[in-house]
Amino acid sequence: MSRILIPKESSSGETRVAATPETVKKFLEYGCNLAVEIGAGEKAGFLDGSYEQAGATLVPVKDTESWSNADVLLCVNTPISNDLSMLSKETLIMGLLEPYSNKSLLEDLQKLKLSALALELLPRISRAQSADVLSSQANIAGYKAVLLAASALDRYFPMLMTAAGTVQPAKIVVLGAGVAGLQAVATAKRLGGVVYVSDIRPAVKEQVESLGARFIDPPDFTENAIESGGYAKQVSEEFLLAQRNELKRQLSDADVAICTAQVPGKKAPKLIDEEMLDQMRSGSVVIDLAVNQGGNCYGTKQSETVVRKGVKLIGASDLARSVPNHASSLYSRNLLSLIGPFIKDGLISLNENDELIEGALISKDGVIKKESLLTSRGTI
């Protein structure tokens, strides 16, 4: 039977875990062997006793024997090189591995002859929806971004009619109508805000308007802003300039801007520049969810709040970590959904010709499967 190890995440600030007692039971029903490091789920509200009750074996953190015996390592973030060196050859690693920006990962995979599935590379097709880690975590980020903005804003979100007079609703501009953006729209509407959405893809207009928001039509250019799988792609500088001109007008009377626009494997497009920030009123708030990829807004910094001429610029990186219980539950179900079909009699045997596996497999026994990763290291 395949031996699966769930490590205690070593990344600074990480609160999530790659398996919950619920998914442990499922893996055991498939016939796999589950080992969970002591304290792995504590920050997410899953205590060691709950894993034991589910049937997992608790092992010490960074126990050499446990790591060397593992056939599969389910993680949230890439373990450090010293930890990877404890794994045996051909061990499979599954997690959010950031293959385009993690400079040492490919070297470790090649040197140690490890296999790896980078979950952020799963193709956006219907069959992948239940395994789509980016969507499940982005959904949380969009929700928390609005709550963060409401907390930081110097005004109410809803319109209120009080004895002292009427309070006008806040105007929220959401940049990007992907999963995070649409969840931000829904949450902001529930709080009573007036929401506008900017996206380079005209096709998302119907989704935006179905949530009660107003769509800011993109510039009238002939170029296609959609890649296969529905992702937004990088567009020309002329297109972005025209889009920024319209955004400048919208942001001049906005209370909140929530930036969610990202392109997989590329730097985030810079949508809000200094001139646009100068037009925003003192006391307004910008939440930049793309800050880890360079940011959509000028001046944002990872995990920091910068006050620029009265405007609060919040670099909201890794917001899913702030809801670790549900984030872990969804993440672990994504993993189970992806590899469950490839488990037979307790053995995990991935089919490299399967569309999902082929899309996410970046290394097989140390052989890098995607040439694009070798030529674009450190692009983000």
Image: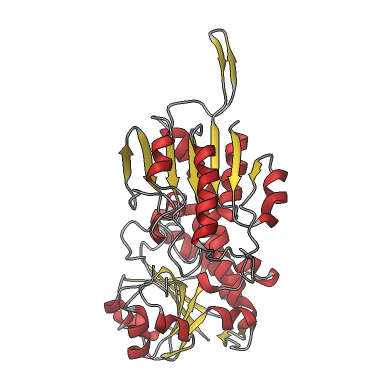
Q: Quadrant of residue 131?
A: bottom right
Horizontally, residue 269 falls left or right of residue 304, namely: right
Horizontally, residue 139 falls left or right of residue 47, namely: right
Report x, y in % for residue 363. Answer: 46, 86
- Which residue is depicted at the point 41% across and 47% down? 273
Report x, y in % for residue 127. Answer: 69, 72
Report x, y in % for residue 161. Answer: 60, 15
Viewer-proximal residue among 344 and 150: 150
Q: Residue furthest top?
A: 163
- Which residue is depicted at the point 60% across and 40% down? 196
Horizontally, residue 112 falls left or right of residue 276, namely: left
Viewer-proximal residue among 55 and 361: 361
Q: Quadrant of residue 165?
A: top right
- Which residue is depicted at the point 30% across and 81% down? 64
Q: Is residue 162 above or below residue 355?
A: above
Viewer-proximal residue among 23 and 313: 313
- Quadrant assignment for the C terminus: bottom left
Q: Quadrant of residue 378?
A: bottom left
Q: Is residue 66 above or below residue 52?
A: below
